[in-house]
Image (cartoon, helix red, strand yellow):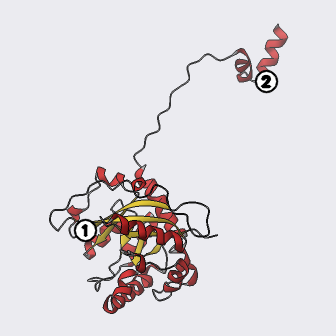
């Protein structure tokens, strides 16, 4: 049975509203959600801080509909990049389970695909893209295991944004052929969430096949999560120590070749 995920639940300081969104996600059948902290370093000199501890949200996490286990909540950081200097691998990134980049220019999009240490590249859905997707950049991201994100909530809120969302999504699909794509909500309120099977069907409007539409909210999201875990532990070190304890008599005999052991026995 598929495990569905929504890797973009907008963070809000309103704890009750955030709880309500997560409870609704669990009721709709999502096994994992990610709380998304968006930082635009161009505006008001925002700084990247640590995320709130997810264990503080609930005393007991809501049970996923149709499952016997509670919903899993991740923390995600999205950096809105207007200049290359805005995206530098910082120690703060390791505090987040997922890291995404929202590139505003073609040059930054290429850098995000080929260089940035990230898990997700956000595709604009509230405005017309100021550049075209290049196959070389998109292929580079796919080879690195980076995924492209399309959020559907803006398409629900406004008809103009709906046109931008569909047009930008179709442009991406022409280049990536449905590979390495995830579909998320970006929901700020419970009413903006839609069920997994509704989103799978919505993927058809975005140019995804039926299979790719389902993967965009299940297996591809799982791959993003694993990529995030790999990124966080990429600098880990394995330390080994040589065992200096003397070998037992039995171990010494076992280490001697059989032919030599036979000659020793005969000499005795």
- Which residue was labeled with disc 2? 258
Q: Is residue 13 left or right of residue 239?
A: left
Secondary structure under tag 1 reads strand
**Where is 249 relative to 95, above or below?**
above
The C terminus, quarter of image: top right
Q: Nearer the viewer, residue 1 or 219?
A: 1
Secondary structure under tag 2 reads helix
Let me know if residue 9 appears in the view. Answer: yes
The residue depicted at 35 percent of the width and 66 percent of the height is 36
Indicate the position of residue 21 as horizontal and vertical percent values.
42, 71
Instruction: Tell which tag, 1 or 2, sits nearer the viewer.
Output: 1
| Residue 81, label in figure | 1
Label 1 Cα crowd, 10 Å radius (few <14 / some 14-19 / many 20+): many
Mark 1 and mark 2 residues within 8 Å of each other at the beta carbon: no
Let me know if residue 165 appears in the view. Answer: no
Indicate the position of residue 191 as horizontal and vertical percent values.
42, 80
| Residue 263, label in figure | none
Indicate the position of residue 114 as horizontal and vertical percent values.
35, 66
**Where is 28 relative to 160, above or below?**
above
Quarter of the image holding residue 12?
bottom left
Indicate the position of residue 180 as horizontal and vertical percent values.
47, 72
Between the residue at mark 1 and the residue at mark 2, the CA separation in whole angstroms equals: 67 Å
**Most distant residue in the left direction:** 44
**Where is 174 relative to 43, above or below?**
below
Dot placed on the residue nearer the N-terminal end, 1 or 2: 1
**Where is 96 relative to 183, above or below?**
above
């Amino acid at each position: 049975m598929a495990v569905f995920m929504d890797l973009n639940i907008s963070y809000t300081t309103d704890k009750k509203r955030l709880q309500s969104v997560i409870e609704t996600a669990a009721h709709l059948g999502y096994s994992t959600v990610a709380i998304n902290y968006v930082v635009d370093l161009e505006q008001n000199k925002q700084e990247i801080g640590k995320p709130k501890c997810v264990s503080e949200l609930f005393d007991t996490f809501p049970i996923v509909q149709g499952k016997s286990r509670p919903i899993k909540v991740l923390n995600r950081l999205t950096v809105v990049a207007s200049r290359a200097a805005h995206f530098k691998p910082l120690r703060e990134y390791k505090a987040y389970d997922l890291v995404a980049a929202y590139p505003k220019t073609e040059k930054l999009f290429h850098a995000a695909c080929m260089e940035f240490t990230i898990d997700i590249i956000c595709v604009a859905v509230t405005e017309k893209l100021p550049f075209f997707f290049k196959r070389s950049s998109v292929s580079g991201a796919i080879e690195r295991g980076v995924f492209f994100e399309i959020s559907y909530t803006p398409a629900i809120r406004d008809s103009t944004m709906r046109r931008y969302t569909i047009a930008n999504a179709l442009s991406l699909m022409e280049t990536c052929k449905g590979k390495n794509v995830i579909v998320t909500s970006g929901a700020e309120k419970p009413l903006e969430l839609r069920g997994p099977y509704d989103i799978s069907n919505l993927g058809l409007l975005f140019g995804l096949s039926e299979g790719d539409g389902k993967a965009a909210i299940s297996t591809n999201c799982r791959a993003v999560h694993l990529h995030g875990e790999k990124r966080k532990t990429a600098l880990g070190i394995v330390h080994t120590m040589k065992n200096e304890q003397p070998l037992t008599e039995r171990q010494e005999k076992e280490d001697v070749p059989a032919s030599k052991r036979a000659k020793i026995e005969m000499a005795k």
